[in-house]
Amino acid sequence: MNSKFQNNMERLIFSSRWLQAPLYLGLIVAQGIYVVQFMMELSHLVADIAHLDEAKTMLIVLGLIDVVMIANLLIMVIIGGYETFVSKLDIEGHPDQPEWLSHVNAGVLKVKLATALIGISSIHLLKSFINAAQLDNRVLGWQVGIHAVFVVSAFMMAVTDKVMNQTLNLQSKH
């Protein structure tokens, strides 16, 4: 009887991973919103091209790049998270299968996400530097500090992941 209860409990716990599926669907909706935002910003750029100087054009283009990088981050979370935590995707042999998906795990996903956040933070920092005359030095200082924390955190995650993989490889050899 205890074994049957335990088996049912384990099945319930394992099945609970499907509670994350609606979260990934919500992220797909969010990505659609970013596509709309990108197209609106692009149409503003094209419509106002005659009235924009180089700095304003660069700020708008950096905004577009920022949207693309966030969309890439969303794809990594949606596909990688679903594959890692919910269910395997049945795309083996599909010509469009992302190369990185074949070796994704929680550690790799965290490092990829941290790297993407650094890229997004870099774009924001570049936009701030271009617009530095309109910003308070304290704001710029905080942005640089937060970016530095992202860089250090990503580096530490990568080192931790590498050490864990080396430890696992050593254990599997023995």
Image (cartoon, rainbow, N blue to C red):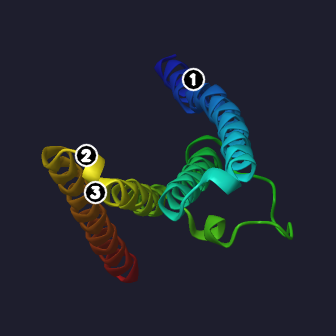
| Residue 43 placement (x, y as % from top left) | 74, 45
Q: Relative to 25, is 76 on the left or the right?
A: left
Identify the amino acid type marked 2: Leu
| Residue 105 placement (x, y as % from top left) | 51, 59
Q: Residue at x 21, y 57 (%)?
A: 144
Identify the amino acid type marked 1: Leu
Q: Which residue is mark 2?
A: 135
Q: Quadrant of the C terminus?
A: bottom left
Of circles 3 and 1, the one toward us is 3
Q: Which residue is mark 1?
A: 12
Identify which residue, 98 or 119, lies in the foreground: 119
Query: Badge 3: few (under 14), some or many (20 or more) residues near its Cα, within 10 Å?
Result: some
Q: Is residue 169 above or below residue 36?
A: below
Q: Relative to 106, is 30 on the left or the right?
A: right
| Residue 51 placement (x, y as % from top left) | 63, 51
Say which element carries label 1: helix
Q: How many marks?
A: 3
Q: Earlier in the sequence, mark 2 or mark 1?
A: 1
Say which element carries label 2: loop
